[in-house]
Image (cartoon, rainbow, N blue to C red):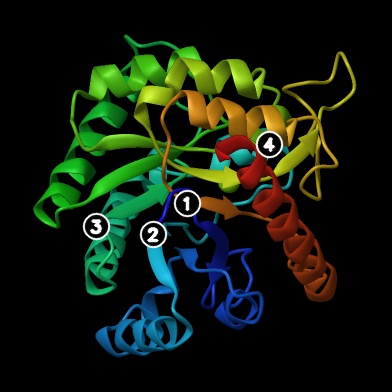
Amino acid sequence: MSRWPIGVFTSVDAGLGVHLDVARELEIPSVQVHAPHQQTRTPQMAEQFLANCADAGITVTCVFGGFEGESYADIATTARTVGLVPEAVRAARLQEMKEISDFTRLLGCDAVGLHIGFVPEDRSSASYQSLLDVTRDLLDHADRNDQFVHLETGQETADHLLEFISDVGRDNLRINFDPANMILYGTGDPIEALRKVGHLVRSVHCKDGKWAPEGQRGTAWGTEVPLGAGDVGMETYLRTLAQIGYTGPLTIEREIPQDRERQKADIRTAVNLLTSLRESVLG
Ligand code: MG
């Protein structure tokens, strides 16, 4: 693929992405996919999905894991329920991520992504140490499938994410950088964060957001908005991606599945914005 192909986050039957037909209609050449539910994660489904992609000229660039029981209702609920961090479900979700890695292999894709959850701040705590073990276990499984694991950003500061990745100590652990999440979760300036973690970024989301009011950042959600309408600064974002040497897809994420028509319209606008910014940034 050429440098910075446009992409879009899609769903088969789980997650907040658009269906593949939207990517086809908008002639978007690459997709990330939210892993389907366990019962549809079959070789037949993989084969059918790949055939549909081939038919539309679409490449699958990353498969994202998600789990039953996760809720993004508010930041506190997200911290309690999301990813491999919640201890009561850690072992079961590790097993499920391994199955998602196997399904990803069926899709011929070399990257699985996830929100790992709010990584505990105390690096000497038992919970942090056990999360390191679980993450290494997943990475070793992914490595046997010739895959990288991409951690979605937002739930930690850039500095803590770097500490965690260094503590895990595996070469196939990388970052899916989402600038809007840094704003929505209130975890730091996205451009500054991207400069810090840039050497580990292997995929990105193009998503925009507005900060929560001063004094509420980190406890109340910011607001996700159409690309270009938020506080990320899309031109600066793309210029920074060029500076860090990123060449992968620009995957649009618009998380309003309750309004499919508006979701599609916003994605169309985002494609146009990214196409014109790409031209001016890359020349
Ligand atoms: Mg994202």
Inter-mark Cα distance, 1 to 4? 17 Å
Q: Quadrant of residue 222?
A: top right
Q: Quarter of the image containing the C terminus?
A: top right
**Circle number at residue 98:** 3
Look at the numbered disc 1 and give the secondary structure of its residue: loop
* Residue corresponding to mark 4: 180
Is ligand 1 closer than 8 angstroms to the Cβ of mark 4? yes
* Kind of residue at disc 2: Thr
Are the residues at dot 1 and dot 3 in contact (C-beta closer than 8 Å)? no
Q: Earlier in the sequence, mark 2 or mark 3?
A: 2
The furthest residue to the front: 283
The foreground one among 2 and 133 is 2
Q: Which residue is mark 2?
A: 61
**Mark 1 closeness class: few <14, some 14–19, many ≥20 residues within 10 Å:** many
Q: Which residue is mark 1?
A: 249
Q: Which mark is nearer the camera, 1 or 2?
A: 1
Q: x%, y% of residue 186?
A: 71, 23
**Horizontal and vertical percent position of residue 43:** 25, 84
